[in-house]
Amino acid sequence: MEESHGTGSHDWFGYREVGVSGARRRCCGRLTRARLLIFFEKLPSCLVGIEACGTAHHWARELIGLGHDVRLMPPSYVKPYVKRQKNNMADAEAICEAVTRPTMRFVPVKSPAQQSVMVLHRTRSILIRQRTQISNAIRSHMAGFGMAAAIGRQGLQSLIEVVEGPADERVPLEARGASPCSPRGCGW
């Protein structure tokens, strides 16, 4: 490859041209997301380094579609190459340096299907964590009224029945209305 490019936080880009004799020329400039593809469309096929972040896989697929050799690197692997304070231009320069190292380990570019599976897993994980938080909050609030229940869903269900039961006076009316949604309605 004749050239290598590094992008910082999708706002700055670093450019390094490496000639046959090894002579290097560096240019840095501001590049917005809207102009990123326009910039790379005009370049001949080259090596592009990107820090693996939230949008890195999308940009990598776009740049690969333009014929570039794109390599994603974990931020922790790029950090040792930052020579001065952390900012977008310093990050871009560090990425340019890191992407050309022969021992650098790269992150494979994920397809949209692979990313979709990750979205499903992460969403499920968040929902499970939130369900646990709500059940712990219900247990804690009911303990404040002197009610305890057995561990597990059956014990939690007994507390929910007390909260939903209008005849049970252990829970004041104000506390009954504080529930954002009925746990039964949330699929418990």
Image (cartoon, rainbow, N blue to C red):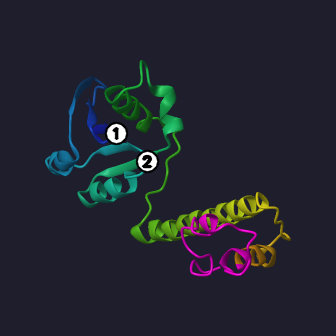
Q: Dot 2: what SS?
A: loop
Q: Which residues are magenta?
A: 161-188
Q: What amino acid is at disc 2? A: Cys
Relative image position of residue 64 (x, y in whole percent): 30, 57
Number of numbered tags placed on the structure image: 2
Please identify the quarter of the rendering in which residue 18 is found: top left
Q: In the image, is residue 93 part of the stretch drawn in magenta? A: no
Relative to 116, is 150 on the left or the right?
Answer: right
- Vertical comparison of 179 with 16: above or below: below
Are the two marked residues, 1 and 2, in contact with CB atoms closer than 8 angstroms? yes
The image quarter in which residue 160 lies: bottom right
- Which quadrant: the C terminus? bottom right
The N terminus lies in quadrant = top left
Give the residue at x 34% y 58%: 58
Residue 15 falls in image quadrant: top left
Query: Which residue is label 1 attached to?
Result: 9
Q: Residue at x 27, y 35 (%)?
A: 12
Q: Main secondary structure of the magenta part?
A: loop
The x, y position of residue 186, in whole percent, is 57, 77
The residue tagged 2 is 53
Q: Is residue 170 left or right of residue 37?
A: right
Q: Residue at the spot x=31%, y=27% of the render? A: 89
Q: Residue visible at 41% across and 36% down?
A: 100
Q: Is residue 75 left or right of residue 129?
A: left
